[in-house]
C-alpha cells in the first residue's frame, strides 16, 4: 500500500530521500528470504522490526501494532523499544500508532515537544526519551488494523526518510501476508490430520465393541455416543481410551502367554 506524499513535509515534495536510498526490489527479496528462513510468524515479525531500524534512516526502535479480537496490541518490537510506549497509546485510545492503524493514514510527529494532538502520550514518550515518531499503516490480510511504528530520540529524525518507511511497510505487508497464509495452511492441514486421526480412533473403538458385544457398527457407535454424553467426555477421547486399554490388555496377555510357554518348556 502506497500512501500519498504529505505536502506539509518538504522532504516529500521533492520525492527525494537524501539520507538513505529508498527500499528497492533487492530489499523486498531479502524480506521474503527472511520469511523463507524464519521459524514462523512471530520470528518473522521480530526480524522485520530489526530490519526496519536499519532500512529507515533516523529510526532507533520499531514495533508492529495489530488489532486482534477487537483490541490493539504490539505483536513485535526491537530490543531498544521503551517499555509501555505502545501500551500507553492503547490505554488512552489515541496516539500515532493507534491513529495510523485505525485511520489507515500515516502519522508523523516530528517533535513530540511541540505535539498538540496527543498531549498525554507526548508527555509520556518524552519522559522515556522519545522525541519523534512515525507510524505507517500496514495492509495485513484478515486484520482490520495494523501499523509499523518507528521511534527516535532526536527531533525531525524522519524528515528525509518517510519514503523509505513507506516502501519498507509495503514490502513488510507482503511478507507478513505470505507468512499468514503459510500459518493458515499449516493450521488447516493440522485440522485435517486431527479429523483423520479422530475418525481412525473412533472406527477402531467401534470395531472393538462389535467384537466384544457381537453387535452391529451402528449399535456400537450409538453406545459410544451415549457414554460420551453421559460422562461429558469427547467421543474422540473416549474412543482413544478404549483403544489404548484394549491394546494394553492385548499386549499384556500376549506377554503372559509367552511366559507360560517358556515355563512349560523348562
Image (spheres, rainbow, N blue to C red):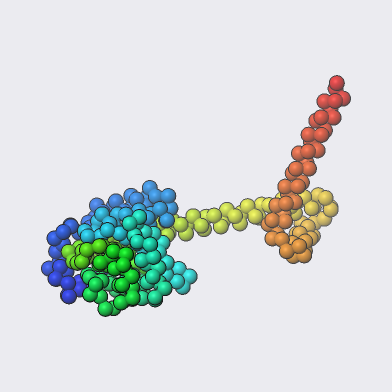
Q: Is residue 157 visible?
A: yes
Q: Residue furthest bottom?
A: 116
Q: Reply above or below: 114 against 26.
A: below
* Residue situated in front as seen by the camera: 206 or 53: 53
* Residue situated in front as seen by the camera: 49 or 85: 85
Q: Tell me what residue is drawn at x 28 percent, y 64 percent.
A: 129
* Residue situated in front as seen by the camera: 85 or 29: 85
Q: Is residue 66 visible?
A: no
Q: In which quarter of the image is the N terminus?
A: bottom left
Q: Reply above or below: 181 against 96.
A: above
Q: Position of residue 197 (x, y in %)?
A: 63, 52
Residue 97 in which image quadrant = bottom left
Q: Which residue lies furthest to the front in this view?
A: 127
Q: Tell me what residue is drawn at x 52 percent, y 55 percent.
A: 189
Q: Tell me what residue is drawn at x 22 percent, y 70 percent.
A: 110
Q: In which quarter of the image is the C terminus?
A: top right
Residue 182 in which image quadrant = bottom left
Q: Tell me what residue is drawn at x 48 percent, y 70 percent.
A: 69
Q: Position of residue 194 (x, y in %)?
A: 59, 55
Q: Where is residue 253 in the image (x, y as percent from the top left)?
A: 81, 38
Amino acid at each position: 500500500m502506497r500512501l500519498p506524499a504529505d505536502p506539509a513535509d518538504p522532504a516529500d515534495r521533492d520525492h527525494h530521500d537524501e539520507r538513505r536510498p529508498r527500499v528497492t526490489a533487492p530489499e523486498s527479496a531479502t524480506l521474503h528470504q527472511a520469511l523463507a528462513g524464519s521459524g514462523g510468524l512471530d520470528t518473522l515479525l521480530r526480524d522485520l522490526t530489526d530490519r526496519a531500524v536499519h532500512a529507515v534512516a533516523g529510526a532507533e526502535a520499531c514495533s508492529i501494532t495489530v488489532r486482534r479480537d477487537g483490541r490493539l496490541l504490539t505483536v513485535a518490537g526491537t530490543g531498544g523499544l521503551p517499555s509501555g510506549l505502545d501500551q500507553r497509546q492503547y490505554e488512552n485510545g489515541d496516539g500515532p500508532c493507534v491513529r495510523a492503524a485505525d485511520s489507515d493514514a500515516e502519522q508523523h510527529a516530528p517533535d513530540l515537544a511541540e505535539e498538540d494532538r496527543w498531549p498525554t502520550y507526548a508527555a509520556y514518550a518524552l519522559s522515556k526519551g522519545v522525541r519523534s515518531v512515525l507510524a505507517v499503516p500496514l495492509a495485513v490480510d484478515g486484520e482490520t488494523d495494523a501499523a509499523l511504528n518507528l521511534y527516535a530520540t532526536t527531533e525531525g529524525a524522519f524528515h528525509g526518510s518517510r519514503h523509505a518507511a513507506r516502501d519498507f511497510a509495503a514490502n513488510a505487508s507482503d511478507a507478513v501476508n505470505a507468512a499468514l497464509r503459510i500459518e493458515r495452511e499449516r493450521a488447516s492441514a493440522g485440522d485435517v490430520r486431527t479429523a483423520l486421526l479422530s475418525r481412525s480412533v473412533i472406527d477402531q473403538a467401534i470395531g472393538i465393541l462389535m467384537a466384544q458385544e457381537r453387535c452391529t457398527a451402528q449399535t456400537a457407535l450409538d453406545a459410544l455416543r451415549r457414554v460420551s454424553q453421559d460422562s461429558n467426555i469427547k467421543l474422540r477421547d473416549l474412543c482413544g481410551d478404549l483403544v489404548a486399554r484394549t491394546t494394553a490388555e492385548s499386549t499384556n496377555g500376549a506377554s503372559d502367554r509367552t511366559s507360560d510357554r517358556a515355563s512349560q518348556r523348562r
